Amino acid sequence: DAGVTQSPTHLIKTRGQHVTLRCSPISGHKSVSWYQQVLGQGPQFIFQYYEKEERGRGNFPDRFSARQFPNYSSELNVNALLLGDSALYLCASSAIGATNEKLFFGSGTQLSVL
Amino acid sequence: KNQVEQSPQSLIILEGKNCTLQCNYTVSPFSNLRWYKQDTGRGPVSLTIMTFSENTKSNRRYTATLDADTKQSSLHITASQLSDSASYICVVSASGSSNTGKLIFGQGTTLQVKP
């Protein structure tokens, strides 16, 4: 059984561009969360989706948006990229997104903004 | 402000030795506390999850403790192996509708196990 898969694994963009990151959860999982991890820091919560609805949002600007599809996969979009957006973007899935559930993380997308 | 702080920032130990990592948090209302292991360039992998009523939980050579009164947790690694070299992250989950799905991560402790 495949774990959480993210694509692409690495990405290089320039300032002002737009980027779309993709995540496929573990089969049967309906909740997907997105996190940003800057080098040397712990991950920071961006969004959580469950059954295609946004369930939670962290302190990120409106340049960050996401959606979840009927097959429970998810996309994270970032507009007008800034140098500070360079980070490892992690996706995690769980069955129903309950607070006590175990989260399963993908290996992340390493985004570099030049 | 909800915060999770870990110490030490980094640690070097010899293979076979034990070590203990610390985590202090100021998250409220508290739901659960998790320890994750993160290898370089990979996503975090769950080691333990503890709720308010649990004060010890073990997973192979990893033992986590939780003192909900002092808002402190520790992760003890026994008989360390080279493969234990990684970043260990303490994560606290807040409960309540305004905190749904929101995990507060510490900055991690980087452990290096040397032969």
Image: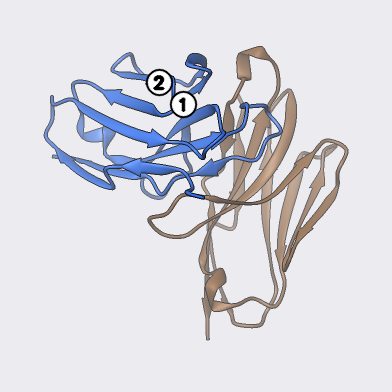
Residue shown at 26%/39% (left/top)? A86
* Chain B drawn colour: brown
Measuring from the top left, give residue A38's x and y in whole percent: 37, 42
Measuring from the top left, give residue B16's x and y in whole percent: 66, 83
Cα distance between the residues tagged 1 and 2: 5 Å
Is label 2 in a helix, a strand or a loop?
A: loop
> In the displayed structure, would residue B15 be above or below residue A97?
below
Q: Are marks 1 and 2 on the same chain?
A: yes
Q: Which chain is blue?
A: A
Is label 1 in a helix, a strand or a loop?
A: loop
> In the displayed structure, would residue A25 be above or below residue B17?
above
Residue A72 is labelled as 1
Residue shown at 62%/13% (left/top)? B98
Identified by mark 1, the residue type is Tyr
Residue found at the far bottom of this picture: B115
Dot 1 crowding, Cα within 10 Å, few <14, some 14–19, many 20+: many
Q: Dot 2 falls on which chain?
A: A
What residue did someone put label 2 on? A69
Q: Are marks 1 and 2 in contact (CB under 8 Å)?
A: yes
Identified by mark 2, the residue type is Phe
Residue shown at 53%/86% (left/top)? B115
Residue shown at 83%/35% (left/top)? B52
Measuring from the top left, give residue B72's x and y in whole percent: 75, 44
Q: Nearer the viewer, residue A48 or B23?
A: A48
Dot 2 crowding, Cα within 10 Å, few <14, some 14–19, many 20+: few
Q: How many marks?
A: 2
Taking A14 as reference, is B81 left or right?
A: right
Residue A107 is labelled as none
Measuring from the top left, give residue A37's x and y in whole percent: 40, 41
Taking B78 as reference, is B37 left or right?
A: left
Identify the image quadrant of the C terminus of chain A: top left
Q: Nearer the viewer, residue A16 or A98?
A: A98
